[in-house]
Image (cartoon, rainbow, N blue to C red):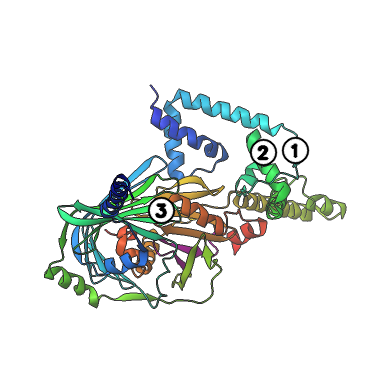
């Protein structure tokens, strides 16, 4: 029988799970739960199907007269990938119609993705370097060298593309050090006398 | 004036006097209470419980406070906090070189509700208003002005945090000696800097000081006279700073890494190549307003990702 509280917790994570945006701890917990919970697996499949359907939706023109105050932030990425729900797409589209900053951000993001996609498509056989070398009528040895160079360039491009797409791992954070600095400054603030709950115990062994 | 009418007037005046006597409500400045509480010296055990979004975090701490310096007993060692310093048991710590005067407390007004008894001690209940919203209720010990119970409320009236003493004694002499024993500790002094990319105010909180650590992390400290928080700015972070045990939550329309603890909340995010970490005792509605005024989460662009890899 499904653990209702864990199901509810996992359900909240499913969207981020499908986006690959879970923190390592969350991912481990979600995977562990999904492994044994048929209910959540069904929910996840349904969510995946909805997202697949959204990808087929046509581009919606933003209604210029509507203003939505919330900046979509990281959701712009999901917006470009067609991974938002219909309601979310509508909200983001509406917001983009009235927010110059977010339109610029979307443009930058789209340009970055286009560049990354272009890098991924580089393959040794179709590399512009190889045909160019062949057209110059150089010798066999030179062609081998060119192909090797192209292959190396393509491999580098692939690694670069993957690394830039994933953005690397999370930076470890020394919370104890930050908590110490925060507590030191808090100790001379007036509220400290009344509510010393703001004293951090982070880092106390 | 008829006899009946005279009786009615007399009864009305008597009733008004009785009501005024029974409800000795007195509006005052929050700063008055803070100043009186600043002199409180005590030792005791305090329970802190925070509830947010259906999750509850709790912690029990042994606290001794003498002359504005607080000593908290950890499982194996003590931490001493006060006068701009934090020191661990015999291991030195951090000291701020200088700091600004505390934030002005005109954002809040305090109203005495009445006399009560807590832990068998005469106490006084005070309600702190932010405009017309009840932001806190504090029960002060009349003899020492120690806050025996502190309740913090979210903007919608939900109880957010409770800090309550389960036992309390006025501080004995040996506690003073114990606190002062830390005076010989070695400290890493953190200098204050004038420039900051952080806003001067955020949701009514004033940036009081900015410090720069030896690790290059800038530290902006904000306060509003009652609550306070720090924002740490990590340059060229390479990835969103990860908080152990954190959730990803939607706040102020964006997604943040969040850790809720009994005493405070931690929030992390990334704006381009810069990482941000906020820590403070803010109620949830204040936190959302503050985040709205700080640089919002923003994915790095192509150039920034390139620098993440090779910069």
Marks 1/3 in contact by CB < 8 Å: the verdict is: no
Marks 2/1 in contact by CB < 8 Å: the verdict is: yes
Rounded to the nearest whole Å, what is the CA distance between mark 3 and mark 2? 31 Å
Which residues lie in the magenta part?
B220-238
Residue at mark 3 = B265
Residue B82 appears at what percent x and percent y? 30, 70
**Residue at 72% over, 45% down:** A121
Report whether mark 1 lies on the same chain as mark 3: no
Considering the image in quadrants, where does the C terminus of chain A appear? bottom left
Q: Does B229 appear in magenta?
A: yes
Residue at mark 2 = A89
Residue A151 appears at what percent x and percent y? 70, 50
Residue at mark 1 = A60
From the viewer's perspective, is residue B199 above or below residue B154? below
- Mark 2: few/some/many CA within 10 Å (<14, 14-19, 20+): many
Residue A66 visible, this angle:
yes
């Amino acid at each position: 029988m499904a653990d209702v509280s864990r199901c509810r917790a996992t359900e909240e994570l499913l969207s981020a799970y499908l986006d690959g945006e879970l923190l390592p701890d969350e991912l481990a917990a979600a995977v562990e739960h999904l492994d044994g919970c048929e209910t959540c697996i069904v929910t996840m499949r349904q969510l995946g199907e909805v997202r697949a359907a959204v990808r087929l939706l046509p581009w919606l023109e933003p209604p210029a007269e509507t203003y939505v105050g919330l900046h979509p932030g990281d959701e712009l990425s999901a917006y470009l990938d067609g991974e938002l729900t219909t309601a979310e797409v509508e909200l983001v589209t509406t917001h983009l119609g009235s927010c110059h900053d977010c339109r610029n951000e979307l443009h930058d993001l789209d340009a970055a993705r286009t560049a990354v996609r272009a890098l991924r498509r580089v393959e040794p056989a179709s590399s512009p370097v190889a045909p160019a070398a062949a057209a110059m009528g150089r010798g066999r040895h030179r062609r081998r060298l060119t192909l090797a160079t192209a292959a190396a360039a393509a491999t580098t491009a692939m690694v670069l593309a993957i690394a830039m797409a994933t953005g690397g791992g999370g930076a470890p954070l020394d919370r104890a050090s930050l908590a110490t600095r925060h507590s030191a400054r808090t100790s001379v603030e007036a509220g400290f006398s009344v509510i010393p709950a703001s004293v951090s115990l982070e880092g106390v062994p | 004036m008829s006899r009946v009418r005279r009786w009615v007037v007399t009864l009305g005046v008597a009733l008004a006097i009785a009501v005024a006597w029974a409800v000795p409500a007195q509006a005052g400045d929050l700063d008055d209470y803070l100043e009186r509480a600043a002199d409180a010296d005590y030792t005791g055990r305090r329970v802190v419980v925070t509830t947010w979004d259906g999750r509850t975090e709790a912690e029990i701490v042994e606290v001794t406070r003498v002359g504005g310096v607080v000593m908290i007993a950890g499982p194996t060692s003590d931490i001493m906090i006060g006068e701009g310093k934090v020191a661990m048991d015999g291991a030195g710590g951090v000291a701020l070189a200088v700091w600004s005067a505390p934030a002005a407390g005109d954002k809040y007004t305090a109203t005495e509700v009445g006399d009560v008894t807590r832990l068998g001690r005469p106490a006084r209940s005070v309600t702190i208003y932010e405009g017309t919203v009840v932001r806190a209720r504090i029960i002060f010990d009349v003899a020492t002005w120690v806050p025996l119970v502190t309740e913090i409320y979210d903007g919608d009236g939900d109880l957010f945090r409770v800090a309550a003493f389960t036992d309390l004694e006025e501080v004995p002499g040996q506690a003073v000696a114990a606190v002062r024993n830390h005076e010989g500790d070695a400290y890493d002094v953190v200098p204050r800097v004038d420039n900051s990319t952080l806003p001067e105010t955020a949701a009514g909180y004033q940036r009081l000081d900015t410090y720069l650590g030896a690790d290059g992390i800038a530290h902006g400290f904000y306060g509003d006279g009652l609550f306070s928080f720090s924002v740490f700015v990590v340059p060229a972070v390479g990835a969103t700073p990860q908080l152990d045990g954190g959730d990803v939550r939607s706040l102020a329309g964006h997604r943040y890494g969040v850790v809720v603890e009994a005493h405070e909340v931690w929030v992390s995010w990334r704006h381009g190549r810069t990482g941000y970490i906020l820590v403070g005792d803010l109620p949830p509605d204040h936190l959302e307003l503050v985040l709205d005024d700080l640089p919002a989460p923003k994915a790095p662009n192509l150039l920034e990702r390139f620098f993440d890899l090779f910069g």
